[in-house]
Amino acid sequence: MGYQRRFAIVSFTIAATFVSMSASAHAILVDSTPKANGSVPAGHAALVLKYNSKIDQGRSRLVLVGPDHKETSLPITVSADRPNELDSTAELSPGAYVIHWQALALDGHLTRGDLAFTASAKP
Protein backbone atom coordinates (compact mmCIF):
# COMPACT_ATOMS: atom_id res chain seq x y z
CA MET A 1 0.00 0.00 0.00
CA GLY A 2 1.39 3.39 -0.94
CA TYR A 3 2.28 6.12 1.52
CA GLN A 4 -0.47 8.45 0.26
CA ARG A 5 -3.14 5.79 0.61
CA ARG A 6 -2.04 4.94 4.17
CA PHE A 7 -1.96 8.64 5.03
CA ALA A 8 -5.50 9.07 3.65
CA ILE A 9 -6.82 6.10 5.65
CA VAL A 10 -5.20 7.30 8.88
CA SER A 11 -6.46 10.86 8.29
CA PHE A 12 -10.00 9.62 7.64
CA THR A 13 -9.94 7.45 10.78
CA ILE A 14 -8.76 10.36 12.94
CA ALA A 15 -11.37 12.71 11.45
CA ALA A 16 -14.16 10.15 11.97
CA THR A 17 -13.09 9.69 15.59
CA PHE A 18 -13.23 13.44 16.27
CA VAL A 19 -16.63 13.77 14.58
CA SER A 20 -18.10 10.95 16.67
CA MET A 21 -16.55 12.35 19.86
CA SER A 22 -17.95 15.83 19.26
CA ALA A 23 -21.39 14.46 18.38
CA SER A 24 -21.57 12.44 21.60
CA ALA A 25 -20.28 15.31 23.71
CA HIS A 26 -23.53 17.29 23.68
CA ALA A 27 -26.02 16.70 26.47
CA ILE A 28 -29.19 15.40 24.83
CA LEU A 29 -32.47 15.32 26.76
CA VAL A 30 -33.61 11.68 26.79
CA ASP A 31 -36.43 11.69 29.37
CA SER A 32 -38.30 14.08 31.62
CA THR A 33 -40.93 14.47 34.31
CA PRO A 34 -43.24 15.93 33.20
CA LYS A 35 -43.11 14.48 29.70
CA ALA A 36 -42.86 16.86 26.75
CA ASN A 37 -46.37 18.12 25.94
CA GLY A 38 -47.68 16.06 28.85
CA SER A 39 -49.78 16.99 31.83
CA VAL A 40 -49.23 16.94 35.60
CA PRO A 41 -51.58 17.81 38.45
CA ALA A 42 -51.38 21.40 39.69
CA GLY A 43 -49.64 21.90 43.03
CA HIS A 44 -46.17 20.94 44.21
CA ALA A 45 -44.40 19.17 41.34
CA ALA A 46 -41.05 17.44 40.94
CA LEU A 47 -39.28 18.43 37.72
CA VAL A 48 -36.66 15.99 36.41
CA LEU A 49 -34.74 16.32 33.14
CA LYS A 50 -32.52 13.35 32.23
CA TYR A 51 -29.67 13.56 29.72
CA ASN A 52 -27.49 11.10 27.86
CA SER A 53 -24.32 12.28 29.62
CA LYS A 54 -23.12 13.71 32.91
CA ILE A 55 -24.13 17.33 33.52
CA ASP A 56 -22.39 20.16 35.36
CA GLN A 57 -25.40 20.67 37.60
CA GLY A 58 -23.95 23.76 39.26
CA ARG A 59 -23.56 25.68 36.01
CA SER A 60 -26.67 24.47 34.19
CA ARG A 61 -29.95 26.41 34.27
CA LEU A 62 -33.70 25.81 34.45
CA VAL A 63 -36.19 28.64 33.91
CA LEU A 64 -39.92 28.05 34.31
CA VAL A 65 -42.30 30.17 32.23
CA GLY A 66 -45.80 30.09 33.68
CA PRO A 67 -49.27 30.70 32.27
CA ASP A 68 -48.82 34.43 33.02
CA HIS A 69 -45.55 34.40 30.98
CA LYS A 70 -43.56 35.21 34.13
CA GLU A 71 -40.08 33.62 34.13
CA THR A 72 -38.78 32.03 37.32
CA SER A 73 -35.27 30.63 37.72
CA LEU A 74 -35.49 27.25 39.40
CA PRO A 75 -32.90 26.01 41.88
CA ILE A 76 -31.24 22.78 40.70
CA THR A 77 -30.70 20.04 43.26
CA VAL A 78 -27.07 18.96 42.93
CA SER A 79 -26.78 15.19 43.29
CA ALA A 80 -23.74 12.97 42.85
CA ASP A 81 -26.12 9.98 42.68
CA ARG A 82 -27.82 11.35 39.54
CA PRO A 83 -25.06 13.13 37.58
CA ASN A 84 -27.04 13.05 34.31
CA GLU A 85 -30.11 14.85 35.69
CA LEU A 86 -31.31 18.36 36.39
CA ASP A 87 -33.81 18.13 39.25
CA SER A 88 -35.97 20.85 40.77
CA THR A 89 -39.45 21.47 42.18
CA ALA A 90 -42.11 24.11 41.58
CA GLU A 91 -45.55 25.14 42.72
CA LEU A 92 -47.80 24.96 39.67
CA SER A 93 -51.20 26.55 39.17
CA PRO A 94 -53.37 25.22 36.34
CA GLY A 95 -52.22 26.29 32.89
CA ALA A 96 -49.54 25.94 30.23
CA TYR A 97 -45.84 25.95 31.16
CA VAL A 98 -42.48 25.83 29.44
CA ILE A 99 -39.15 24.92 31.00
CA HIS A 100 -36.24 26.61 29.23
CA TRP A 101 -33.26 24.38 30.03
CA GLN A 102 -29.56 24.90 29.53
CA ALA A 103 -27.35 21.87 30.22
CA LEU A 104 -23.58 22.08 30.43
CA ALA A 105 -21.95 18.72 29.73
CA LEU A 106 -18.80 17.96 31.73
CA ASP A 107 -16.67 18.39 28.60
CA GLY A 108 -17.86 22.00 28.24
CA HIS A 109 -20.50 21.63 25.51
CA LEU A 110 -23.65 23.64 26.20
CA THR A 111 -27.07 22.63 24.87
CA ARG A 112 -30.42 24.36 25.26
CA GLY A 113 -34.02 23.44 24.74
CA ASP A 114 -37.62 23.89 25.80
CA LEU A 115 -39.98 21.47 27.49
CA ALA A 116 -43.66 22.38 27.21
CA PHE A 117 -46.28 20.84 29.52
CA THR A 118 -49.59 21.58 31.20
CA ALA A 119 -50.61 21.61 34.84
CA SER A 120 -54.22 20.47 35.20
CA ALA A 121 -56.63 21.47 37.94
CA LYS A 122 -57.11 18.93 40.70
CA PRO A 123 -60.51 17.19 40.52
Image (cartoon, rainbow, N blue to C red):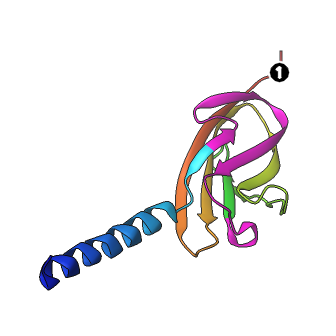
At x 58% / y 40%, what residue is drawn? 116
Q: At which x and y percent is residue 92?
A: 79, 39
Image height of 23 relative to 115, above or below: below
Where disc 1 sits, the SS reads loop
Q: Which residues are magenta?
A: 31-60
Place residue 1 in its image quadrant: bottom left
Place residue 118 in its image quadrant: top right
Q: At which x and y percent is residue 8?
A: 19, 77
- Which residue is farthest bottom? 3
The one of 74 and 36 positioned closer to us in this rendering? 36
Q: At which x and y percent is residue 69?
A: 62, 48
Quadrant position of the C terminus in the picture? top right
Image height of 71 relative to 58, above or below: above
Q: Which residue is mark 1?
A: 122
Q: Amino acid at mark 1?
A: Lys
In-image side of 63 versus 14 (left or right):
right
Q: Is residue 67 visible?
A: no
The one of 99 and 81 positioned closer to us in this rendering? 81
In-image side of 46 versus 49 (left or right):
right
- Which residue is farthest top? 123
The one of 29 and 114 positioned closer to us in this rendering? 29
At x 80% / y 31%, what residue is drawn? 42
Image height of 43 relative to 25, above or below: above
Q: Is residue 52 magenta?
A: yes
Place residue 32 in its image quadrant: top right
